Amino acid sequence: MARLLSFAVARIYHAVTFRTLHQQRIHRELIVMKQILHRSCHSAAFTLLELLVVIAIIAILIAILLPALGGARCEGQKTKCLANMRGLGQAFAAYSIEDPGGYTTPIHPQAERNWLYDGEYEYGGATGLGVFAHPDFRAEQRVLNRYVYGTVQVGAPVDLYECPTDEGVPDAPVDFEPFFTSGEGVGKSVRESTGTSYRLNNHIDFLNQTGYSDFFYGPYFRPKTRVPSVSDTVLLEETIAEVAKWNDETFSTKGWHCKTNRFNVLFVDSHAGSIFLKGQRDLSDQYPDYWILRGDGWRMDCYPAKPVPDLPSF
């Protein structure tokens, strides 16, 4: 009996001792882990210098990325504008096929008999302001709209005629159209003012360097068959391009797509592209009695086809 009691006491002592040692080991391990975590947290903290370095790096990255993002946005808007022009090009081609005279663009019966019907903007688009709100020039009366949309009801959207970055016409040394800088169009987009961002190429000798100042040298008022080179003759342009045309080569014109002196245009053969245009020179000594304006891959004139008078006589 004494032996049995002694064995039991020994077992209990062993168990208690084992448990105590185990708890001590766990306690020691917890202390070590706490120390490790404390050191880890302490080492992960930023010093003020490190924080300033990180902020500087982030600022540099933003400075590098922002222009790239802005450029991508400009390119996207430029692409949308070109798509609009190509859509209008298809409509112009359809109109030209149906027009009895095969003209490149719609021409109002009163065009050039009355200055109201000059026609650079009234070919299509929305109802504009001032003269461009004339009853004959309301959206539902503009001929090309029927080829673009079928029919146009009062108040219907005509988005195809709007450049997404149409910023209007800025002040310049030579003011090609006071309507935009001192008339109803002041502070407004060209689309809002005239009904469309895009102007027909009615290329004229506005410097009076030839004997044909009242004639058109481009595709306006001309049958498509009388355009010598349909693939590089401009039919339609962003209105901002007129600023570059009318001012000399020393003046820089910011285009609507973030690039200086670059403008979207539509060609007579219905394809669209971007051109570089900066001022113009008198080349009448090389081309007597003809007003020439050309650049790399484009032309505003229809030389050698003769100039077209205000009242066509084909």
Image (spheres, rainbow, N blue to C red):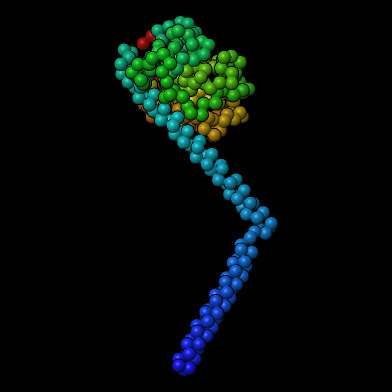
Q: Quadrant of residue 259?
A: top right
Q: Position of residue 67 (x, y in %)?
A: 56, 42
Is residue 189 something that shows in the picture?
Answer: yes
Q: Position of residue 75 (x, y in %)?
A: 48, 37
Task: State the residue at coordinates (44%, 34%).
Answer: 79
Q: Position of residue 50 (x, y in %)?
A: 65, 58
Q: How many marks?
A: 0
Task: State the residue at coordinates (49%, 25%).
Answer: 238
Give the vertical position of 128 relative to 33 (above or below).
Answer: above
Q: Quadrant of residue 85?
A: top left
Task: State the residue at coordinates (57%, 14%).
Answer: 184
Which quarter of the figure is the N terminus placed in? bottom left
- 97 relative position to 312: left or right: left
- 81 relative position to 223: left or right: right
Single out the residue that lies furthest toward the right: 48
Q: Position of residue 47 (x, y in %)?
A: 67, 59
Which quarter of the figure is the C terminus placed in? top left
Task: State the residue at coordinates (46%, 24%).
Answer: 162
Is residue 296 something that shows in the picture?
Answer: no
Give the vertical position of 115 relative to 250 (above or below).
Answer: above
Judge by depth and name the residue closer to the eye, 279 or 6. Answer: 6
Judge by depth and name the residue closer to the eye, 130 or 155. Answer: 155
Single out the residue that lies furthest toward the front: 1
